[in-house]
Image (cartoon, helix red, strand yellow):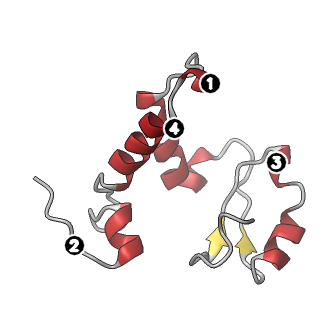
Amino acid sequence: ISCLTGQPCHSITPGRGMEFAKHAEISVALEKVKFYFPLPHHPWQRGTNENTNGLLKEYFPKSYDLNDVSEEYIQSKVDEMNKRPRKCPGFKTPYEVYYSTVLHLA
């Protein structure tokens, strides 16, 4: 909640795990943000999320122990991902969409 407070947040489409069991409380805390739960075994209903998970696995495979990774390294990979163009927003980067700017990436 603290990470999303004050940020533009129109909806949340979580997985079906227990980590969102208190979604109603989260919705109220984030000014009635809408939650959309996908059907079981329908990962295509969370396409961007599933794609991002795949990208994360390029940097951090399942067997990777994040306790052995520096915060600086993790942040560098977050920055790389946020400056990687995505099909969904017209091949803009998440950085460009969030900051309403244009990056000139080579």
Looking at the image, do the residues carrying marks 1 and 4 touch, with CB atoms under 8 Å apart? no
The residue singled out by tag 4 in the image is 71
Q: Please report the residue visible at 41 percent of the width from the left and 29 percent of the height from the top.
A: 58
Q: Along the polypeptide, which appears first: circle 3 or circle 1?
A: 3
Q: Position of residue 36 (x, y in %)?
A: 71, 66
Q: Distance between the residues labelled 3 and 1?
A: 21 Å
Q: Please report the residue visible at 65 percent of the width from the left and 68 percent of the height from the top.
A: 4
The residue singled out by tag 3 in the image is 19
Looking at the image, do the residues carrying marks 1 and 2 touch, with CB atoms under 8 Å apart? no
Quadrant of residue 25 in the image?
bottom right
For badge 1, the amino acid type reads Asn
Q: Where is residue 106 in the image (x, y as percent from the top left)?
A: 10, 52
- At mark 3, the secondary structure is helix
**41 or 34: nearer the eye?**
34
Q: Where is residue 23 in the image (x, y as percent from the top left)?
A: 84, 63
The residue singled out by tag 2 in the image is 102
Characterize the local packing of mark 4: few (<14), some (14-19) or many (20 or more) Cα atoms within 10 angstroms: few
Q: Can you name the residue that lies furthest to the top here?
A: 63
For badge 2, the amino acid type reads Val
Characterize the local packing of mark 3: few (<14), some (14-19) or many (20 or more) Cα atoms within 10 angstroms: few
Q: Please report the residue visible at 84 percent of the width from the left and 78 percent of the height from the top.
A: 28
Q: Along the polypeptide, which appears first: circle 1 or circle 2?
A: 1
Q: Along the polypeptide, which appears first: circle 3 or circle 2?
A: 3
Q: Mark 1 against mark 2, which lies toward the viewer? A: 1
- At mark 4, the secondary structure is helix
Q: Mark 4 against mark 3, which lies toward the viewer? A: 4
The residue singled out by tag 1 in the image is 67
Q: Distance between the residues labelled 3 and 2?
A: 35 Å
Quadrant of residue 95 in the image?
bottom left
Q: Mark 3 against mark 1, which lies toward the viewer? A: 1
